[in-house]
Amino acid sequence: MTSMTPNDRELAEKLLCIWFDVPKITLGDDSVAKRGLAMAQTARTLITAELAAKAIAQHSDDMAVDVFASAMKEKLKFAREQKGRGGWENCPTGDLVDMLYAHLAKGDMRDVANFAMMLWHNLNGRPVLDIPDFAILTAKADALRAENERLREEMRDLYKGYVRTLESARDRIMDFGGNCDPVDVMEAGDPVLIKARA
């Protein structure tokens, strides 16, 4: 009878722990360990078949929600353990809505979903529209969007004005017989203009 390798023994012990839902199993002599490995391999086959059947039976919506919920939990755990965050259960609804909007702009949908979950939980599933401050919050968000658009328009005007100044300066240099790069070359070499144009 060939003896088991340490890897075989470890695999058997781990699989039996999963199968019997116990924290630790230590297999004794090789004959017991080999029987344990055979049981463990059967258990692994059954577990794999059961998981495969569940995956086949599960709708893609459910699978996506399960995966996303895990990602949300990881993000919450990181914020708790690494940043010391917590206390959302007692956070004013308006503050949570503000944070949701702020994180929406940052683009991490895990954060947005976590704030939505906090709001849903704190409001006992009621729509956010039911809270008295929602109209104020909506008006505030609308005002911020309008201010953002106004600033963008001003930035576009400043950009156009700057380009016109470059064109004028180029024309004057050329009128006096000088050499000057075309405006598009000057624009391409100016990191501030490149950033403003984006």
Image: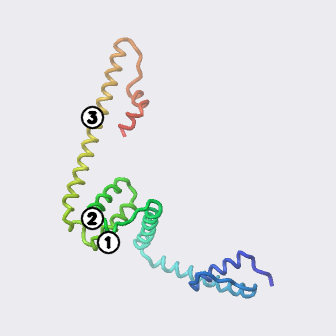
**Where is residue 151 drawn, in percent x and y?**
27, 41
Q: Helix or strand or loop: what does disc 2 sit on?
A: helix
Q: Which numbered disc, 2 or 3, marks the residue that appears first in the sequence? A: 2
**Where is residue 189 drawn, in percent x and y?**
43, 30
In the drawing, does residue 26 fall left or right of residue 160?
Answer: right
Residue drawn at the location 48% of the way across and 79% of the way down: 54
Residue 92 image-quadrant placement: bottom left
Residue bearing mark 2: 93
Q: Helix or strand or loop: what does disc 1 sit on?
A: helix
In the drawing, does residue 152 fall left or right of residue 10?
Answer: left
Residue bearing mark 3: 157
Residue drawn at the location 40% of the way across and 71% of the way down: 61
Tell me the CA gap for discs 3 and 1: 45 Å
Amino acid type shown at disc 1: His
Instruction: State if disc 1 and disc 3 touch (CB < 8 Å).
Output: no
Q: Which numbered disc, 3 or 1, marks the residue that appears first in the sequence? A: 1
Residue 28 image-quadrant placement: bottom right
Is residue 55 or residue 115 the one in the foreground? 115
**Where is residue 34 drawn, in percent x and y?**
72, 85
* Quarter of the figure that contains the C terminus: top left
Instruction: State if disc 3 and disc 2 touch (CB < 8 Å).
Output: no
Q: Which numbered disc, 1 or 2, marks the residue that appears first in the sequence? A: 2
In the drawing, does residue 176 fall left or right of residue 24?
Answer: left
Residue drawn at the location 34% of the way across and 20% of the way down: 169
Residue drawn at the location 58% of the way across and 86% of the way down: 20
Tell me the CA gap for discs 1 and 2: 11 Å
Few, some or many residues within 10 Å of mark 1 (<14, 14–19, 20+): few
Residue 89 image-quadrant placement: bottom left
Residue bearing mark 1: 121
Amino acid type shown at disc 3: Asp
Is residue 124 or residue 66 the one in the foreground? 124
**Closer to us: mark 3 or mark 1?**
1
